Amino acid sequence: MAERREGEIALPFDPAERAEAGLCFIGRIRSPWVKGTAPKNIGAARDIEHTSSLELDPVYAPALAGLSVGQAVQVLYWVDRGERELIVQSPAHAEGPRGTFSLRSPVRPNPIALATVVITGIEGATVGIDAIDAYDGTPLLDIKPWIASVDVRPGWRGDG
């Protein structure tokens, strides 16, 4: 269990022990990051020159049909080395504690992360991407196309 900051609250149980659904990892994220070296978020990852990719199990390669270089996609991945029980966090960048669901922190009951990335190449079952903040070997859950007309309401700024 990690050291807690003032105001943080943890669940009295491990959410992994209450699993109700089965997941199938479709591959792994390949990046240069390991614990202690990963950028803080996807924005920071874009500021660091690096090579990253999505390495799918070859059986899923046909599912890449229709994707293209330069296209934005949403990548869902399983933060397998993250904590799960913390539901109120005290992030260093914020004043005071905040609920986990108001943060992009990888610490959450279901450690599912989302990054919108740009495809830089596709070769077989490997998809090159412009950046990622995940550790090397992180399990990949899904890839979905980012579609402006669907994913962003026209005229909506999204900054509150």
Image: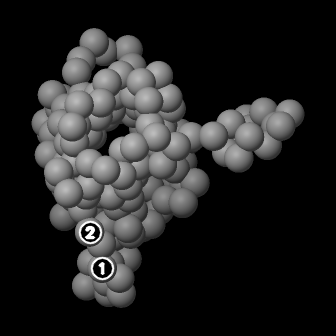
Query: Residue 66 versus residue 45: which sits nearer the camera?
Result: 66
- Residue 139 visible from this viewpoint: no
SS at badge 1: loop
Vertical placement of residue 70 versus 133, above or below: above
In the picture, residue 139 is in which quadrant?
bottom left
Numbered label attached to residue 157: none
The percent coordinates of residue 147 (x first, y second) are: 63, 40
Q: Is 113 on the left-hand or right-hand side of 97? A: left
Vertical placement of residue 94 versus 89, above or below: above
Classify the position of the C terminus by image quarter: top right
Work out how far the residue at label 2 is from the one at label 1, CA to CA, in angstroms. 7 Å
Task: Tell me if mark 2 has few (under 14), some (14-19) or many (20+) residues whose alpha carbon lies within 10 angstroms of its own.
Answer: few
Q: Which residue is mark 1?
A: 22
Classify the position of the N terminus by image quarter: bottom left
Kind of residue at badge 2:
Cys
The percent coordinates of residue 34 (x first, y second) are: 13, 36
Q: Are marks 2 and 1 in contact (CB under 8 Å)?
A: yes
> Residue at position x 36%, y 45% from top?
64
SS at badge 2: loop
> Residue at position x 35%, y 22% from top?
120
Numbered label attached to residue 24: 2
Q: How is the image coloured?
A: one colour
The percent coordinates of residue 21 (x first, y second) are: 35, 82
Task: Name the residue furthest right.
Answer: 155
